[in-house]
Image (cartoon, rainbow, N blue to C red):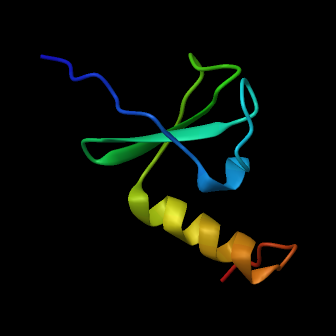
C-alpha cells in the first residue's frame, strides 16, 4: 500500500500565497522536496544529506571544499 505524502510548507517561504513555496514531506528513509509551482517534480534526499546542505548554507560559505 502506498501512503500519501504529507507536504509541509517551508518556514522560509515567507507566508507567500500561491506558487511561491518550497514544500517538504517525510517518506520512509528519505525526505522529498518540491516547489509548489511544479509539484510533480520531486527532489529526494536523506535526512543527513539535507542537514549537511542546510548547515553549509547557514554558514555563509560560498564554495564547497573537497576533503
Front residue of this view, candidates 22 and 66: 22
Rendered-image quadrant of the C terminus: bottom right
Q: List x then y, in percent, for residue 40.
A: 56, 16
Q: How many marks?
A: 0
Q: Is residue 29 above or below residue 7?
A: below
Residue 9 occupies quadrant: top right
Residue 3 occupies quadrant: top left
Q: Is residue 27 left or right of residue 63?
A: left
Q: Is residue 47 left or right of residue 51?
A: left
For the point 83% across and 79% down, which residue is it?
Answer: 61
For the point 56% across and 38% down, which residue is it?
Answer: 23
For the point 28% across and 47% down, which residue is it?
Answer: 29
Front residue of this view, candidates 12 and 53: 12
Q: Is residue 29 left or right of residue 65?
A: left
Q: Is residue 32 above or below residue 46?
A: above
For the point 62% across and 67% down, which residue is it?
Answer: 54
Rendered-image quadrant of the N terminus: top left
Q: Is residue 33 left or right of residue 22?
A: left
Amino acid at each position: 500500500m502506498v501512503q500519501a505524502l504529507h507536504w509541509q510548507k517551508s518556514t522560509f517561504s515567507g507566508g507567500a500565497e500561491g506558487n511561491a513555496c518550497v514544500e517538504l514531506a517525510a517518506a520512509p528513509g528519505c525526505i522529498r522536496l518540491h516547489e509548489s509551482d511544479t509539484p510533480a517534480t520531486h527532489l529526494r534526499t536523506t535526512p543527513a544529506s539535507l542537514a549537511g546542505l542546510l548547515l553549509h548554507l547557514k554558514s555563509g560559505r560560498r564554495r564547497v571544499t573537497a576533503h
